[in-house]
Image (cartoon, rainbow, N blue to C red):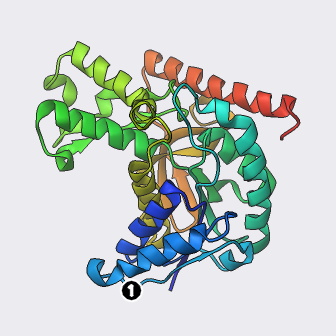
Amino acid sequence: MKKVTIIGSGNVGSSCALYVSEKRLADVVLIDVVEGLAYGRALDSVEAAPIRNYDTRITGTTDFSEMEGSDVVIMTAGKARTPGMSRDDLLQVNAKIITSVSKEIARYAPNAVLIMVSNPLDVMSYLALKVTGFALKRVVGMAGVLDSTRFRYFLADKMGVSVADTNALVLGGHGDSMVPLPRYATVNGIPIQELLPKDTIDKLIERTRKGGAEIVGYLKTGSAFWAPAAAAAEMAECVIRDKMRILPASAYLRGEYGIDGLFVGVPVKLGKDGVEDIIELSLSKEENEALQNSAAGVKAVIEKLEEMNLL
């Protein structure tokens, strides 16, 4: 049986454990430093198994050595956003957490593919790569899958169509400068430009960029968790089952799209070894400028890390 470790047993981590189990992908280990939290969430999940018809094992622990032999590690640990807080505001506290946990991953799960969910996601992916020393393709950020999923839902909701018929693509950093690409968004193969006026598309793009903040504003004391967890579980499925799906995700670029040495959201082929390939699209001048601007934002936050001696 394959093994997936999820670090952090809050709303995202525990939801992800449930999704992974319902997909029957692997046995799951939930790890959290808060005594009893991971065990309680794991126990609650396995008690649902007879109804939800999965027989994977879900265990909870505070012991990082329990991740040994993991095929995939999903990082959800860290502080969540509250109203008025940007993803970058989380930088200092989460950088310290990610650094500490990444050392444990390198020690106990050196052959795993690491899927980063913690924010600021692109920067935390960069930090985890540096700390673990993993091969570039074995660290990947869950960003584009979530952002594209939100764009797909907003399109379906606006047009009154099934979400199953929508496709969308969002590139760039996981933040307000993300780059939804309307010319790659379709409804059952029909470009959305033929179905919606430009001003409506622009509003949906802006809502996609603010999708996480919109939920934070409603929840007041937390941030989104079901959709991020579902996105991470989908990525884990690509790795565990070597599905070789092309999905948007935050990957380390070495010159692709004219970007070097940063994690930025781009289309990737996701398989058993992680990012098996990076797909380079022909972008318009406007699209490329937006992507470069988004990458510059990621770079600026990395420079903040360096200034704080956290990198």
Residue 49, image quadrant:
bottom left
State the image quarter where residue 179 is shown. Answer: top left
> Which residue: 42% across, 80% down?
46
Residue at position x 51%, y 24% in the image: 177
Q: Quadrant of the C terminus?
A: top right
Total marks shown come to 1
Q: Nearer the viewer, residue 282 or 303?
A: 303
* Quarter-of-image position of residue 244: bottom left
**Amino acid at the residue labelled 1:** Asp
The percent coordinates of residue 258 (x first, y second) are 62, 29
Can residue 77 be seen in this snapshot?
A: yes
Residue 99 spot, x, y in % from top left: 78, 52
Residue 112: x percent and y percent?
64, 69
Q: Residue furthest top?
A: 199
Q: Secondary structure at mark 1?
A: loop
Where's residue 34, x and y in %?
67, 63
Q: Is residue 72 left or right of residue 246?
A: right
The image shows residue 71, relative to residue 176, as above or below, that is below
Q: Residue at x 11, y 36 (%)?
A: 160
The residue under label 1 is 55
Q: Nearer the viewer, residue 267 or 84?
A: 84
Q: Is residue 299 above or below residue 106?
A: above
Q: Nearer the viewer, residue 133 or 156?
A: 156
Depth check, front residue: 206 or 111 = 206
Query: Residue pushed farthest right?
Result: 309
